[in-house]
Image: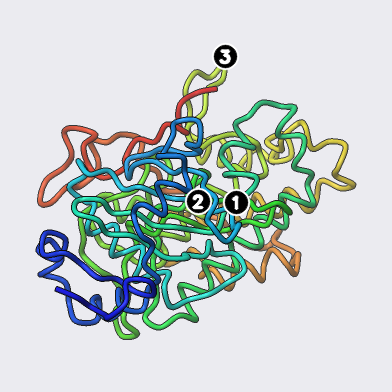
Amino acid sequence: MNFCLSSLNCFSFSSSSSESFSNHSEQDSQTLRNLHAFLYDELKIATDGFRSSNKIGEGGFGSVYKGRLKDGRTVAVKVLSVESKQGDREFMSEIVSLSNISHANLVKLLGGCIDGPSRILVYEYMENNSLAQVLLGGEKIRANLSWKSRKEIALGIAQALAYIHEEVKPHIVHRDIKLSNILLDQNFTPKISDFGLSRLFSENVTHLSTGVAGTLGYLAPEYAVSGHLTRKSDVYSFGVLLLEIVSGRTAIDFDVELGEFFLVEKAWEMYKSNQLLQLVDPVLKGSISSGQEVVHFLKVGLLCVQEKCGLRPYMSKAFKMMCDGIDMDDLQISKPGLITSIMDVKIGNRRSSSPSFTRMLSPQLQTR
């Protein structure tokens, strides 16, 4: 089954490859036709045979390798796990979401490869890896991110989410916004990556009923317990991410005195006692002229994680609030929602009894 005449420009499948895609729509097939197809051997050479020393990332989806193409371009090569039952769906979700959109704060998909059971995606290479590596790399590494840099990173992520939520048609909900899915280029410009769990929303659709997928600590509570996915689900995840960026802590963190705790709960307690400034990452002291702006960003983060999803701002509004620095003293922030146990998460028609749903527990959530 050939989708085009030349495999140099678009996908051409063998019968074994096309069988697993037989249930995809004609629209999906057209998307594949328009995507540049890399040859498997071309990518094997580029990564030195997918050598372990070239591996720059790993997760539930598979592994990512640094590679160098014949034309001199350095790329990131994501090899989806053959064992993953979600492999084909994540492969198509990534392609459908990224192939026809472009934004300075979204990672650029350069093409892909289908060879027998292999599913490979090729992206622009990000020199500074992920935001997780920087924020979780210890105080010396975190100190490289000044408040100015963190502010720009937060604003870039907000702009990209506003773009896919509100400007792109159909709208896109990412479903797995977290530190490890924010990549940083040589100038520390943030790029949202990994759209394997993303879902498309038509203009007249307010929510989708779907299986719960994501990462504990970032899951919007209403989505986790009901499976009703909205754009506000991403807004919640962004709120958690914003708290992480400012505090230098992770969504689920550890303290000698507190033990394991959730950052959202900690931020809420400090907000109620008017001590939010104490949550700011200590390594930022030298790069902050006034605590007012960083506290303002923390408050925006708390607005985004409110329990009632209708009270959370849309991403364009959250971006505007961060840019304008509007006075939030008179703005009522209500209690945040939080899923603290996988037992509370809905899988299919039941509550979870195990952490088996897609990408629930991420390595980045382990304590430092």
N-terminal-most mark, 2 or 3: 2
Quadrant hosting residue 141:
top right
Q: How is the image coloured?
A: rainbow
Identify the element where label 2 is drawn.
strand
Of 361 and 66, nearer the camera is 66
Question: Relative to 193, is 88 on the left or the right?
Answer: left
Cα–Cα span, label 2 and label 1: 8 Å
Label 2 sits on residue: 76
x then y, percent, for residue 40: 34, 54
Upstream in the sequence, badge 2 or badge 1? 2
Mark 1, other Cα within 10 Å: few <14 / some 14–19 / many ≥20: many
As displayed, is residue 39 above or below residue 149? Answer: below
Q: Position of residue 154 (x, y in %)?
A: 65, 56
Q: Tell me where residue 197 appears, x and y as whole percent.
A: 32, 57
* Residue 253 spot, x, y in % from top left: 51, 28
Q: Nearer the viewer, residue 137 or 224?
A: 137
Q: Residue at x 58, y 53 (%)?
A: 74
For image coordinates 42% across by 31% down, the residue present is 363
